Amino acid sequence: MEFKNNFGFGCMRLPMKNEEVDLQEFSKMVDIFMENGFNYFDTAHGYIKGKSETAIKECLTKRYKREDYILVDKISGWFFKKEEDIDPYFNEMLEKTGVDYFDILLMHTQNRKNYDHFKECRAYEKAFEYKEKGLTKMVGISFHDSPEFLDKILTEYPQIEVVQIQFNYLDTDNPSVESLGCYEVCLKHNKPVIVMEPVKGGRLVNINDEAKEIFSAVSGMSPASYAIRYAAGFENVKMVLSGMSNVEQMLDNISFMKDFKPLNERELKAIADVKEIINKTEQVPCTSCLYCVQSCPKKINIPKIFEAYNKELKGENGMLLYVETTKNSQKASECIKCGKCEFECPQFIDIRRFLNKSKEIFE
């Protein structure tokens, strides 16, 4: 499949009005995105509690011709217990997004904790059958684990056509992510790479003043521009996704991706300096994917609590965010230490330990 460009719309963090997607704002963003020559949209059945798919139907697929956009969806292990569950689940994905086929179908969040479940239920084989039937044009994986485990999957399933990995300047040598190692495994198997989390759930945008000053001294471009262009500059990266939640973010992203230019040596040096600062001050590598919240029996807003924790470490007022976050939801101290959140966490964060640290700081 040929992509028009190397920049895609990740639909996990859409504009919201309270608990609902702001369809008017999202439609406006879709129009701006398409008018500027971009057409790649990425979603999953569980994003925003299923509301991402239905928002795409209302704001994209009902309003544009099918051949004008590329739509990616994912088979997630949370929604099937046996092979017989996959067909109705997949048909629901098609119905909710309003299409007859997907351009790319990914096995979602593949790692050593869920891979056996996908194999036992023949999820990969079902995806390849969907391709034969014309229900998807390509089959790939969305991956969160070690380079060695990625090598195992690509060896066992050489039919996989594309790999989506977490890739950003903070995680290239992060031992819990090893994104550069995963990238090199994709090269070994001759698989094109799609990048998710180039700004690490906003952590590479919401940097402290010292880090911002380093970027400002080089250019007037935003912190997001450095992060996204860093990922897009690797030769085998064919698409970089950005989860944009308002028009301002989209316009900023388009400003540097419409006429994409890789980072120069001065910009790369600035990134190295900023990376050093971030690694000194922020300790919870949360990307706010919300998978932990979906599995938490107490429904603790773990990502927001960790955001408050990180703010406190940076010398900002994390207490204010913590109080606001826990006003209508559970506090860190409500954790029952069941470990379900850690099983689902693609970042392999020691969530229970950091919730306890948050309790000590804020409560």
Image (cartoon, rainbow, N blue to C red):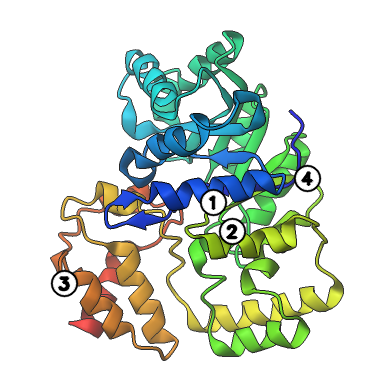
Image position of 41 (left or right of 117): right
Give the percent coordinates (x, y) of residue 210: 59, 90
Q: Is residue 131 visible?
A: yes
- Residue drawn at 72 percent across, 44 percent down: 37
Give the percent coordinates (x, y) of residue 205: 56, 72
Of labels 1 and 3, the one closer to you: 1
Furthest-right residue in this view: 265
The residue nearer to you, when weighing 253 against 165, is: 253
Image position of 108 (left or right of 170): left
Label 3: which residue? 327
Asked which secondary structure carries label 3, the reply is loop
Label 2 neighbour load within 10 Å: few <14, some 14-19, many 20+: some
Whole-number angstrom distance, CA of label 2 to CA of label 4: 24 Å
Label 1 neighbour load within 10 Å: few <14, some 14-19, many 20+: many
Label 1: which residue? 29
> Amino acid type of disc 1?
Met
> Amino acid type of disc 4?
Asn
